[in-house]
Amino acid sequence: MDTRQLTGKLFVISGPSGAGKGTIIKRLMTDSDPDRIVLSTSMTTRAPREGEVDGVSYYFVSMEEFQALVEEGGFLEHAQVYQNCYGTPKAPVIENLARGIDVILEIDIQGALAVKESYPEGIFIFILPPSMTELRKRITGRGTESPEIIDMRLSKVMQEVAYIEEYDYCVVNGEVEEAASRVRSIMTAEHSRVTENVHEIIDRYKEEI
Ligand code: 5GP
């Protein structure tokens, strides 16, 4: 992918199921400027849960519709997570980045690793639960998953944590406000990188002299 014209930043937030990615992101989005940062809406073949809205939580599609977009090359990444398919539609991500708008992806670890291959300029943030006990409590407390699914998710967590070294940052989600604040600090730090600012600032100095 030619990324030279893309000036927004791509923040990829992932981590084990139940680590609280969604809650942190919700918190982040409530006080961020939609002209500067957007959350990508994924496509999934999973059935909507109570309260989920099509086009907001996800684009809920059939397996045929999903496969059609895979064949068109319309996904930035896609993966099978548990029994369902999930994918990040490519076009809106590229359009936003090209307009200088940051994009957040909330995706699973396989997806994040795939994005790292095709878009290594992304910033990869791993969200960790404070403990396995707390993680079990969170997944159980959601009340939406069967006991078999919960056991399957928990057994996957330790395998997933092994990929943490592929990431740039990790944030332990003990308390949502604190975790969201850490993610915000990472975003600010990434926008303060020398590569991004140095030419513009030096040019401005030259004009002043
Ligand atoms: P859930 O079914 O609980 O909404 O999501 C299950 C898992 O799929 C979560 O870890 C979530 O981050 C991940 N996921 C959601 N959207 C995408 C996507 O577009 N791509 C990938 N690879 N994973 C996704």
Image: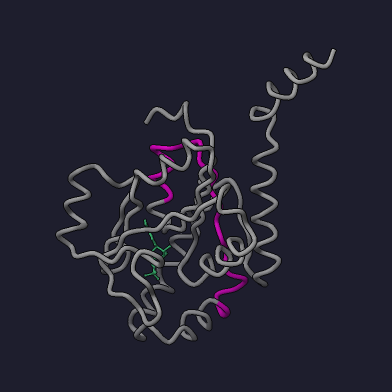
174 and 29: which one is in front?
29
In the image, what residue occupies the spot 33% across and 82% down? 148
In the image, what residue occupies the spot 41% across and 45% down? 93
Q: Is residue 1 left or right of residue 161?
A: left
In the image, what residue occupies the spot 29% across and 63% down? 44
55 and 1: which one is in front?
55
Where does residue 98 sit, x and y in percent of width and height? 46, 35
Asked if residue 122 lies in the magenta stretch, the reply is: yes
Where does residue 82 sit, x and y in percent of width and height? 31, 68
Q: Looking at the image, is 74 positioned above or below residue 21?
A: above
Q: Is residue 204 left or right of residue 11?
A: right
In the image, what residue occupies the spot 56% across and 80% down? 133
33 and 149: which one is in front?
33
Applied colour scheme: one colour
Q: Where, quadrant-wise, is the C terminus in this rendering?
A: top right
Span colored in magenta: 112-134
Q: Quadrant of residue 119?
A: top left
Residue lying furthest right: 209
Asked if residue 114 lies in the magenta stretch, the reply is: yes
Q: Looking at the image, is 88 positioned above or below residue 172?
A: above
Where does residue 128 sit, x and y in percent of width and height? 57, 64
Where does residue 122 sit, x and y in percent of width and height? 50, 41
Q: Is residue 14 left or right of residue 83?
A: right
83 and 205: which one is in front?
205
Q: Quadrant of residue 17?
A: bottom left
